[in-house]
């Protein structure tokens, strides 16, 4: 089974890359902000990627349903009658 990295990790990776690209054009007195945000984005990228890669994969569908159809109700009672269906009226 193939493991994938989620959208959150990719988003933070892209934001870290944007912050790193902006470092040369940022005024020298504010470059610490770019370095900090790039480092913070790298931190979250690594943590979220590890979370995605360590998550167990999905179970096969046949194991999840136990041999039943997915839309089968788990109650012993049938559905209620439809509105407006003919029912015996009580006698006055």
Image (cartoon, grey):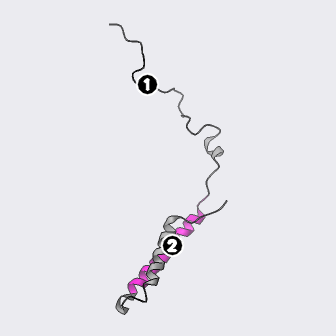
Q: Is residue 34 above or below residue 64?
A: below
Marking on residue 45: 2
Residue for point 61% across, 45% down: 64
Q: Is mark 1 on a helix, strand or loop?
A: loop
Relative to residue 76, is residue 16 depicted above or below? below
| Residue 31 percent across, percent down from the top left | 39, 88
Q: How crowded is mark 1: few (under 14 residues within 10 Å), some or many (20 or more)?
A: few
Q: Is 82 positioned to the left or the right of 29 in the image?
A: right
Where residue 47 appears, as percent x and y from the top left, is 52, 71
Quadrant (top left/top right/bottom left/bottom right) for the C terminus: top left
Residue 14 horizontal/vertical position (percent): 48, 74
| Residue that mark 1 sits on | 82
Query: Which segment did they paint magenta?
Result: 32-56
Q: How far apart are marks 2 and 1 (CA)?
A: 52 Å
- Residue lying farthest to the left in this orientation: 92
The quarter of the picture where residue 19 lies is bottom left
């Amino acid at each position: 089974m193939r493991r994938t990295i989620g959208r959150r990790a990719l988003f933070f990776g892209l934001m870290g890359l944007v912050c790193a690209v902006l470092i040369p054009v940022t005024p020298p007195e504010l470059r610490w902000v770019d370095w900090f945000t790039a480092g913070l984005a790298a931190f979250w990228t690594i943590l979220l990627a590890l979370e995605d890669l360590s998550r167990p994969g999905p179970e096969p569908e046949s194991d999840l349903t136990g041999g039943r159809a997915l839309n089968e109700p788990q109650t012993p009672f049938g559905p209620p009658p439809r509105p407006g269906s003919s029912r015996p009226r009580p006698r006055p």
